[in-house]
């Protein structure tokens, strides 16, 4: 019997995720599942005042500091949805969902420290992941005008650079590898630092240096796709080769349906 490796990163790709009805997502809240919620931010432009009520004073001040209207919209929609989803997940009221922050600025809930979550958005699409294990998520719009060759030397090692160069679709491959690294460091709370370039991200298993405090655990990282225009990755901490279920939900496009989903009073 093959022995389970210790201190590893495992990278792979799934073509599609299991998708369930958003109105039944409470049924899937258990330690075996990572719940992923997707939404189009621009759908809620007319509901920005309704969603703002779920932000506290500090969050409203932060929202109003954004110079661009689309950035303000993204912040309000993403933050309010995160709080609403966590309220359901933890059986709390949205007003009682308040974030504390570790030294690395990774948010957590003091009231529910075992509930882990992460958020990412790019262009028009937002993603939120919630689980009972450390999790990180990233999404990137496949900007065809982006010069991937110019950026690679600052974020990838030699093997990754060669892999992108030899790829049939260099731009997509670049974002595929980039989202893997981003999701991983969002799981650990490391962020993009001087060690970012040294993190391996090609398919398969990579044993990691257990002397580094950051990587003294095991992580699964998977790419997935929600449309042809975006590349996504989800990362989670794991204590074995077992993999949690990844379940995708689409938030309603109309605010009236959101009111029903979250039992919001108009």
Image (cartoon, rainbow, N blue to C red):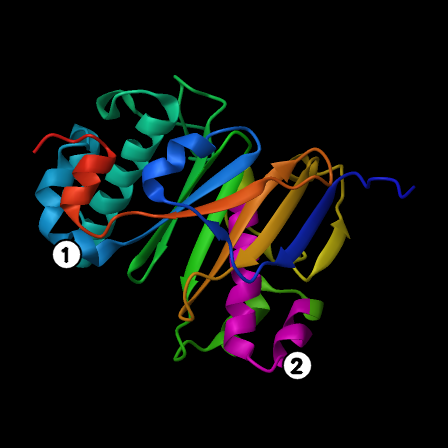
Identify whether 96 is placed above or below 221.
above
- On the question of residue 245 being in view, the answer is yes
Q: Residue at x 56, y 39 (%)?
A: 188
Between residues 198 and 205, which one lies in front from this camera angle? 205
Q: Which of marks 2 and 1 is nearer the N terminus?
A: 1
Q: In this view, does 3 lie to the left or right of 68?
A: right
Where residue 150 sits in the image (x, y, percent)? 50, 76
Residues at discs 2 and 1 in contact (Cβ within 8 Å): no
Where residue 224 sits in the image (x, y, percent)? 52, 58
Crowd class of label 2 (few under 14; some 14 to 19; many from 20; radius 10 Å): few
Identify whether 88 is placed above or below 151.
above
- Inter-mark Cα distance, 2 to 1: 40 Å
- Does residue 184 belong to the magenta stretch? yes
Where residue 8 sits in the image (x, y, percent)? 74, 44
Q: Is residue 216 left or right of residue 146?
A: right
Q: Is residue 249 left or right of residue 258?
A: right
Q: Residue at x 35, y 30 (%)?
A: 86
Q: What stretch is highlighted in magenta?
A: 160-186
Query: Which quadrant of the structure image shows residue 242?
Result: top right
Between residues 18 and 183, which one lies in front from this camera angle? 18
Q: Name the residue under label 1.
A: 69
Query: Which quadrant of the structure image shows residue 257?
Result: top left
Q: Circle 1 — which element? A: helix
Q: Residue at x 31, y 63 (%)?
A: 123
- On the question of residue 189 being in view, the answer is no
Q: Residue furthest right?
A: 1
- Does residue 61 belong to the magenta stretch? no
Q: Mark 2 points at which residue?
A: 166
Where residue 253 sits in the image (x, y, percent)? 22, 52
Q: In which quarter of the image is the C terminus?
A: top left
């Amino acid at each position: 019997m093959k022995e389970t490796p210790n201190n590893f990163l495992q990278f792979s790709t799934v073509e599609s995720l299991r998708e369930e009805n958003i109105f039944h997502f409470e049924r899937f809240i258990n330690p075996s599942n990572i719940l992923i919620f997707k939404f189009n931010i621009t759908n809620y432009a007319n509901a920005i005042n309704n969603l703002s009520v779920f932000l506290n004073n500090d969050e409203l001040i932060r929202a109003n500091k954004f110079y661009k209207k689309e950035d303000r919209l993204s912040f309000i929609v993403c933050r309010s949805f995160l709080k609403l989803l966590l309220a359901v997940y933890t059986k709390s009221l949205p007003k009682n969902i308040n974030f504390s922050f570790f030294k690395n600025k990774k948010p957590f809930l003091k009231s529910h420290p075992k509930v882990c979550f992460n958020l990412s958005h790019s262009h028009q699409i937002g993603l939120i992941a919630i689980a009972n294990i450390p999790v990180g998520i990233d999404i990137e719009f496949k900007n065809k005008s982006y010069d991937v060759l110019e950026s690679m030397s600052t974020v990838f090692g030699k093997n990754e650079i060669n892999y992108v160069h030899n790829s049939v679709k260099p731009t997509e491959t670049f974002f595929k590898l980039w989202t893997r690294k981003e999701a991983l460091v969002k799981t650990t709370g490391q962020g993009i630092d001087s060690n970012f370039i040294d993190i391996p991200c090609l398919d398969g298993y990579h044993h990691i240096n257990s002397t580094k405090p950051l990587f003294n655990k095991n992580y699964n990282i998977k790419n997935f796709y929600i449309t042809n225009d975006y590349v996504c990755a989800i990362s989670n901490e794991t204590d074995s080769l077992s993999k949690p279920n990844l379940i995708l939900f689409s938030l309603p496009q109309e605010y009236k349906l959101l009111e029903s989903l979250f039992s919001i009073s108009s």
